Image (cartoon, rainbow, N blue to C red):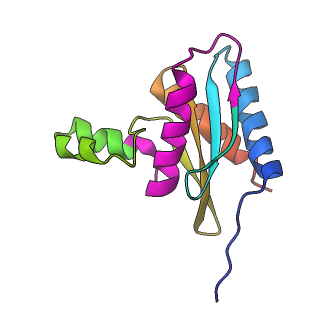
Amino acid sequence: MQSKPYLVLADARRIADASLAEARKNNWNVVIAVCDEGGHLLCLDRMDGAAPISSEIAPAKARTAALGRRASKIYEDIINNGRFAFLSVSSLPGMLEGGEPIIIDGHCVGAVGVSGVKSAEDAQIARAGISALQP
C-alpha cells in the first residue's frame, strides 16, 4: 500500500491566511476557499466587501482544480477555444481562472479557489496562499 500527504485544517488555515494577506496587500476584497483532494471544503473566508456570489464561485473553482488536478484556467481556455461541449461536465462547475491545485510531492492534496477580482488576480491570490506551504 502507498501513502501520500494530505491537508489538515492547520494547513488549510495557513493557506487561507497567506491568501488573505495577498488580497489585503492589494486592497482586493475576495472570497477564498480551500478544499481537500476530493473537492470538499475545508475553509472559506469572505472578506468584508466581497460580492455574495463569490461565496459560490470560489469553492467551485477550488473543487474544479482539485478534481481536475490542474488550474481551473485550463478548462476556461478549453471552452474559450471552442470546445463548448465541455460545459456539460456538471461535476466541474468552476471552469474559470482562479482555482489552483495544491501539489505536494507529486500528489494533489487539495486546491484553492478565489473569486472577487480579475481572474488573473484571483489566481495570484491562490498561488500566494499555496506558497505558504513551502518550507
Residue range in magenta is 45-73
User: Where residue 26 sits in the image (x, y, percent)?
Assistant: 67, 18
| Nearest the eye: 69 or 9 | 9
Residue at the bottom extreme?
1
Q: Is residue 26 left or right of residue 80?
A: right
- Of 72 and 54, the residue lying toward us: 54
Q: How many numbered discs sit on the rendered protein?
A: 0
Residue positioned 52% across, 53% down in the render: 66
Residue 83 in view of the camera: no
Q: Residue at left 53%, top 19%?
A: 117
User: Which image quadrant: the C terminus?
Assistant: bottom right
Q: Quadrant of the N terminus?
A: bottom right
* Residue 76, image x, y percentages: 33, 38
| Residue 50 on the magenta span | yes
Question: x, y (%) of residue 36?
Answer: 63, 54
Residue that lies at the very extreme toward the right in this rendered image: 10
Q: Residue at x 64, y 85 (%)?
A: 2
> Is residue 98 highlighted in magenta?
no
Q: Position of residue 126 (x, y in %)?
A: 61, 38
